[in-house]
Amino acid sequence: MLKPEFWKGKKVFVTGHTGFKGSWLCLWLEQLGAKVTGYALDPPSNPSLFEMAGIARTVDSHRGDVTDRAAMEKVLVAASPDIVIHMAAQSLVRYSYDNPVETFSTNVMGTVNVLDIAHRVPTIKAVVIVTSDKCYHNVEWVWGYRETDRLGGHDPYSGSKGAAELVVQAFQSSFYGKEKGIAAVGSARAGNVIGGGDWALDRLVPDIVRSLLKNEPTLIRNPQATRPWQHVLEPLHGYLMLAERLYTDGHEFASGWNFGPPESSEKTVGWIIEQLYELWGVTFPWTRDLNPGPPECTFLKLDASKAHAHLGWRPKLDLPTTLDWIVKWTRRYEAGDDMRKVSNADIERFMSLKPHA
Ligand SMILES: NC(=O)c1ccc[n+]([C@@H]2O[C@H](COP(=O)([O-])OP(=O)(O)OC[C@H]3O[C@@H](n4cnc5c(N)ncnc54)[C@H](O)[C@@H]3O)[C@@H](O)[C@H]2O)c1
């Protein structure tokens, strides 16, 4: 389990704090009593959880590009953090087909820059690099990928995340490590993260939420595609647990970690939309989008045995509860409630739960 007392007063540098996962992470870290410095471009969507939860009111928030090494170094050195969590990325698969150079530049060189700066900052003891389940070479098999499986990627986004993993390995063995007495680096792989506050384009749940709020049918591309879905707080819980262990136990945790949901969370896109429509109380049918778009992998799941065994990380929310939380969060947003309070209440409730699987 996460140790709340560990985080009290810790200085944490978060990249990508204006994004979906970054905003939730900032709220969580604040609740734990950490002091957060954020570095990212503008929020990638409008609306955004970053704006609606007023993250900049309490986080030392800096706007900057991770490909601008000098600008990021200035902020990181001034922050002199204990822990770095690197999440800034061009995070969309479809967008990456149209913008491969930007995707590789941000996701690969951004990671190079973070790691190249961080090993020179003496206060830093732990670095978590967030990549993706898509970092694996997808051979379309039915088994979950293990951390030791081959890296790869058939599209620019996935390739950039596989490449970011190679960057982590090279920096870990060249510039970090026990013998050098400096920070330990771990990489975190998760995917198909869903939750209130995601407004990204071309992601299933945001597409559904947008259409529900407009009372219009959702356009669905691949209703038969199966994905392992998980609430955003699940992988964030994993990143925090990993950071804790990297900080306290060091280099034995310096490797890749999968944070994937249990098999019961593997459901089709069609199943997800039907559940969300039912919870929202919608009676009209969704619509099939006949434009298939660029190719998408059919199935990819993670084997999270290593995180279960060595970090003690386990999922807490089953999929029906996850969808219920999303609908309740969105109803509160629709009602104009204070979304900082609503999101903080979800985090508190999540922390109080026991692992379910
Ligand atoms: N959401 C998911 O389902 C999912 C799944 C697997 C992995 N991930 C990974 O988790 C991380 C966070 O994802 P998210 O869903 O919050 O993404 P997001 O798109 O909501 O946020 C991305 C963040 O990165 C920042 N950013 C983008 N390009 C940047 C640049 N060049 N310089 C500085 N900042 C930049 C944005 O401003 C934003 O703060 C990413 O690394 C993403 O690849 C997400």
Image (spheres, rainbow, N blue to C red):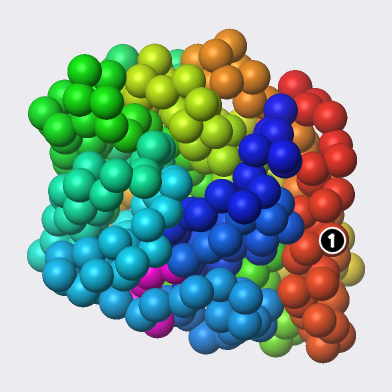
Residue 104 position by quadrant = bottom left
Picture quadrant of residue 42: bottom left
User: Badge 1: few (under 14), some or many (20 or more) residues near its Cα, within 10 Å?
Assistant: few
Q: Residue at x 27, y 26 (%)?
A: 181
Which residues are drawn in magenta? 38-42
Say which residue label 1 marks: 345
Residue 119, horizontal then vertical, whole percent? 22, 42
Q: On the image, which quarter does residue 194 sit in?
A: bottom right
Q: Considering only vertical position in the picture, is 267 above or below 310? A: below
The percent coordinates of residue 277 (x first, y second) are: 78, 63
- How far across and how far down the image is residue 122, in percent? 29, 44
- Our reading of the magenta stretch's main secondary structure is strand
Q: Looking at the image, which residue is at 88% across and 68% down?
A: 281
Tell me the quarter of the image containing the N terminus. Answer: top right
Quadrant showing the C terminus: top right
Looking at the image, residue 78 sits to the left or right of residue 236; the answer is: left
